Each structure stands twice: as structure tokens, then as C-alpha cells.
Image (cartoon, rainbow, N blue to C red):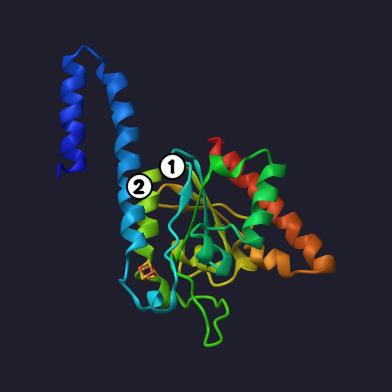
């Protein structure tokens, strides 16, 4: 099978030889190469058995969405609905996130959504549990690759697990949200995970909603290059 880079070089030679301008050919081939790599990554993740988290997992859940987006949204890991349906952020918290994005004028298809961990992490009773940082390390390679291929301007990091993927020393969301950080040239805006928002009531709910909204607006400005 032809290697992707080799294929692109061949297509570049053939298209420029046929008179197409290099400045038109290069961005077109860049897009093609990216979606091919993303599909290869997706297939690889679907068959992954690289750590113990797959032992109880029914499905791997790769990222999904617009691979040309300036805004990537990174959550913790799949819950029960995500595992069953094979997509990230499609349960109650993902639905809330979609609602909030919509209020900000963004359709979820416009952005790319993924998780730090691609397998569901459960406790002995089969309930969702937060993965320990050591458990996330093996799977982090996939998120790193997604970042490398998509090259977003900004990441909205949902919850502590996502925040600690980027900045392991940042231990609490309440201390670090409300700021923009730099991760290898990508802006990172931490905010509450929508699953946390869903669990709040009364004044705490109102406050959390306000903070998520403010963080999302900051992320959108970063995505615009501001
Ligand atoms: S958690 Fe990640 S690294 Fe571990 S088996 Fe699942 S997909 Fe592979």
C-alpha cells in the first residue's frame, strides 16, 4: 500500500505537471492528507488494546467533527451513552454543550470534539468514574496526534482531566479557569465540564453557567484569532 506522504508527493507532481498552480495544489493536498491521517487514526483507535482501560470497554470512542476547525473541544472520556453510540459528548452533558454552543451561534459540526481517554472508565459497579492521571497517559498519544493534525487555534478544555492533559500541575478547575494558557502555540481555555454543570443546583448552577458562558466566549474570540 502506498504511504500517504508518498501519495501526496506523486499527486503534487502530477497536478503541477498538468499546469495547476503549486499555491492551489499545496493547500488542497494538505486537506486531503489530513483527512486520510485522521481516518487512519480513527481506525487505529477503534482497534486499540494498548492499555488496561479497554478490558471493560464495549467501544473505543474516537473524536469527531470538523478537522479544519480553529476550535477543538476536549472532554474527559466517554460515558455510557458515548460508549454505546461510539461518539464523544453525545449524552446529557454533550447535549448541554451543544445547546450552549448553539446559543453562541456555533453548530457542533463546525468544531471538533474529542476526549483525553477514548475508552469508558468505570468503577466496580459499572458506573462512570474519573480516570486517574496515570491511566490517561497511554491514551494521551491519540489526543496529541489529533492536535498535531488539526492544529486548532484554541482548545476549550472541559474539566480537570482535560486541563491536566495540557498542564499536569494545574490541580483544580476553580483556581485556573477564567484564563487563557499556551500549550505549544495552541491557546487553552479551561472551563467546567458540562457533566459538572448538570449536577449543580440553585445559585451554584447559575454561577457555573455564567462561568462556562464567559469561558466559551473567550474561546470563540481566540478561535477568531483575537
Ligand atoms: S484507553 Fe486509549 S490507549 Fe487504552 S485501550 Fe482505550 S483507546 Fe487504547
Relative to 50, 151 lies left or right: right
Q: Secondary structure at mark 1?
A: loop
Q: Residue at x 63, y 46 (%)?
A: 218
Residue 18 in the image, given as x and y percentages of width and height: 19, 14
Depicted 203 relative to depicted 17: above or below: below
Relative to 220, 213 lies left or right: right
Relative to 92, 155 lies left or right: left
Using the image as rendered, state which of residue 146 and residue 173 is in the foreground.
Answer: 146
Q: Quadrant of the N terminus?
A: top left
Q: Residue at x 64, y 49 (%)?
A: 216
Q: Residue at x 48, y 40 (%)?
A: 69
Q: Is residue 76 visible?
A: no
Q: Residue at x 29, y 38 (%)?
A: 33
Residue hosting label 1: 67
- As drawn, the residue found furthest toward the top would be 19
Q: Which mark is residue 147?
A: none
Q: Quadrant of the C terminus?
A: top right
Q: Residues within 10 Å of mark 1 (few under 14, many from 20)?
A: many
Q: Say whether mark 2 is within 8 Å of ligand 1.
A: no
Residue 97 in the image, given as x and y percentages of width and height: 65, 54
Distance (Cα) linking label 1 and label 2: 8 Å
Using the image as rendered, state which of residue 153 and residue 9 is in the foreground.
Answer: 9
Determine the image quadrant of residue 30: top left
Q: Is residue 81 visible?
A: yes
Residue 200 in the image, given as x and y percentages of width and height: 76, 69
Q: Secondary structure at mark 2?
A: helix
- As drawn, the residue found furthest toward the bottom would be 124
Q: Quadrant of ligand 1?
A: bottom left
**Upstream in the sequence, badge 1 or badge 2?**
2
Relative to 53, 7 lies left or right: left
Q: Which mark is residue 38?
A: 2
Amino acid at each position: 500500500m502506498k504511504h500517504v506522504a508518498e501519495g501526496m508527493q506523486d499527486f503534487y507532481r502530477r497536478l503541477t505537471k498538468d499546469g495547476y498552480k503549486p499555491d492551489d495544489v499545496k493547500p488542497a493536498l494538505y486537506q486531503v492528507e489530513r483527512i486520510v491521517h485522521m481516518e487512519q487514526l480513527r481506525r487505529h483507535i477503534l482497534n486499540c488494546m494498548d492499555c488496561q482501560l479497554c478490558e471493560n470497554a464495549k467501544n473505543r470512542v474516537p473524536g469527531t467533527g470538523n478537522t479544519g476547525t480553529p476550535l477543538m473541544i476536549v472532554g474527559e472520556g466517554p460515558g455510557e451513552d458515548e460508549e454505546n453510540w461510539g461518539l464523544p459528548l453525545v449524552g446529557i452533558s454533550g447535549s448541554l454543550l451543544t445547546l450552549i454552543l448553539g446559543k453562541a451561534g456555533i453548530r457542533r459540526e463546525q468544531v471538533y470534539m474529542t476526549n483525553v481517554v477514548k475508552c469508558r472508565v468505570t468503577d466496580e459497579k459499572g458506573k462512570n468514574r474519573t480516570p486517574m492521571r496515570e491511566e490517561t497517559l497511554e491514551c494521551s498519544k491519540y489526543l496529541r496526534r489529533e492536535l498535531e493534525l488539526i492544529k486548532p487555534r484554541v482548545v476549550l478544555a472541559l474539566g480537570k482531566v482535560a486541563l491536566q492533559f495540557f498542564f499536569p500541575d494545574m490541580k483544580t478547575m476553580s483556581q485556573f479557569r477564567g484564563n487563557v494558557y499556551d500549550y505549544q502555540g495552541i491557546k487553552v481555555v479551561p472551563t467546567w465540564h458540562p457533566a459538572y454543570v448538570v449536577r449543580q443546583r440553585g445559585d451554584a448552577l447559575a454561577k457555573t453557567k455564567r462561568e462556562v458562558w464567559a469561558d466559551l466566549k473567550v474561546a470563540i474570540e481566540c478561535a477568531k484569532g483575537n
